[in-house]
Structures are given as C-alpha cells and as structure tokens.
C-alpha cells in the first residue's frame, strides 16, 4: 500500500512540474529581430526659398536701365548720344515681346529722322541727324503703365504709374517752378533752385491730379526752362 501511495505522489509531482514548464512560470519576451528596427526618419529637407524676381525697368533723369532677375544691371540706355538699338534688343528679350518700330523724317531739336520703338504703354524714341552722329542723337522715354509683360517700370526711388501723389511725394517727388510734380533730379541739391536747373523725370498726373498717370524723361526735361 505504501509503495502504491509513493508512486502516486511521484506521478503527481511530475505532472505539476510539466504544467509549470508549459505555462505556469514567467514568459520570456519574444526575441528582438536582428536589424529589423526602423530608424526614425530625419526632418525633411526644406525646399529652398525662391529668390524674389528683381527684374525691372528703371527710369532716371539721364537714362533707363534694365535690371535682370537678380537686380543687376543688364542694359542701360543714356538719353544723350546712345543708339537705343542694343537696349531695345535686350529689353525685347527680357519681355519676350518685340516692339513696333517705325522711322519717319523730322523730329525734336531739328532731328533729320526719328525712330520709335513702341510696346503697349512704353515708348522709346530717338531723334538723330546722320551727319552729326552720335553727338546729336537724343532719346525720349514715355511710360503710361506700371508694368509690361510682368516687368515693373519705376523711377529710381520707386515711383510707378498708378501711385498716388502722396505716395510719390513720400518717395521724394515735388513740384518745380514750371512742373506740377517731378522726381529723380540729376543733382538733388538743385531740385528746389530757381536759378540753376537740373534734369528730372516728369510725373504726369491724371485729371484729378491725384494719381501718377505717366513718366517722361529725355535730355531736355529740366526743373525749369524745359520744352
């Protein structure tokens, strides 16, 4: 009897041991897969900030300059002596727009011929006499739009067609003895003088005289005594 009881007890102990091995004890965490962890992605590389388009047509009292997309001078046309052909070529390429070109006899200051290059709202004209080139060549620019083909047209100080008179005055425009409003004097010290003249850009006004309607410049637009 004692032998059978001992065998039964031993059998029971073995069953408990097997049960403990099967699930009664603490479980080990599953194995970490070797090399399978996903590394956190880095911050996305920011796209470069687009540079502002600085292209513009800038009118001063003595010349007109074409600035490229970086704001650097690409071509300059001086109102006294320069043949505008090369400037017109550079401007046409920048605008991707050819002007209407016409040549006719006569012109200002006794010119033998006048050639006109005209885009919508922008006119560049040159009067010349063949016998005295380049000394007697002169250029006039007339602007009646704030931009052309997306390229802004402005004075050196930033005045554009469509600006209010107050905005233009804030940028330095002022009346002269004979002109309602002018800007960009060649010699700023003479802008208000009544005894010595300096070349300027004339600012044409609308009917209400409240808004800039046009820009004009050539070799003879002075603070007084101009044509």
Image: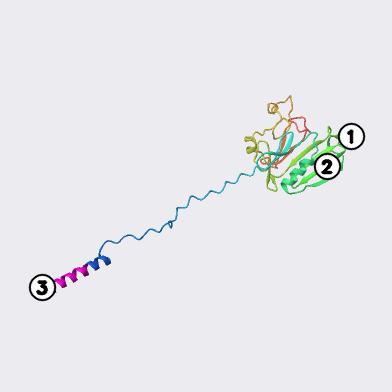
Does dot 2 land on a helix, a strand or a loop? strand
Does dot 1 land on a helix, a strand or a loop? helix
Residue pointed to by mark 3: 2
Q: Nearer the viewer, mark 1 or mark 2?
A: 1
**Vertical side of 32 occupied by 92: above or below:** above
Marks 1 and 2 in Cβ contact (< 8 Å): no
Q: Which residues are magenta?
A: 3-16
User: Does the magenta run of residues contain 8?
Assistant: yes
Quadrant of residue 212 within the rendered picture:
top right
Marks 3 and 1 in Cβ contact (< 8 Å): no
**Vertical side of 34 occupied by 152: above or below:** above
* Picture residue at 83% right of the left edge, 37% below the top: 108
| Residue 146: mark | none
Relative to 184, is 45 on the left or the right?
left
* Picture residue at 76% right of the left edge, 39% below the top: 141
Residue pointed to by mark 1: 131
Q: In the rendered structure, which disc, 3 or 1, sits on the residue that comes first in sequence?
A: 3
Quadrant of residue 79 within the rendered picture:
top right
């Amino acid at each position: 009897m004692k032998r059978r009881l001992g065998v039964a007890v031993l059998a029971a102990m073995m069953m408990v041991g097997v049960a403990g091995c099967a699930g009664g004890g603490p479980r080990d965490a599953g194995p970490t897969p070797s090399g399978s962890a996903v590394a956190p992605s880095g911050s996305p590389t920011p796209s470069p900030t687009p540079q502002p388009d600085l292209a513009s047509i800038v009118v001063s009292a003595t010349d007109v300059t074409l600035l490229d997309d970086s704001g650097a001078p690409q071509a300059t046309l001086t109102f006294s002596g320069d043949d505008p052909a090369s400037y017109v070529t550079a401007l046409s390429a920048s605008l991707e727009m050819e002007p209407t070109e016409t040549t006719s006899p006569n012109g200002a200051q006794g010119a033998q011929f006048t050639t006109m290059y005209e885009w919508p709202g922008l006119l560049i004209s040159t009067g010349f006499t063949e016998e005295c080139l380049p000394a007697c060549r002169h250029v006039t620019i007339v602007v009646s739009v704030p931009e052309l083909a997306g390229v802004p047209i402005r004075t050196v100080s930033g005045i554009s067609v469509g600006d209010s008179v107050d905005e233009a005055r804030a940028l330095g425009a002022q009346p002269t003895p004979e002109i309602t409003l002018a800007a960009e004097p060649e010699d700023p010290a003479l802008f208000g003088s009544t005894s010595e003249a300096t070349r300027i850009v004339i600012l044409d006004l609308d009917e209400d005289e409240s808004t800039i309607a046009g820009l004009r410049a050539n070799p003879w637009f002075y603070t007084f005594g101009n044509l």
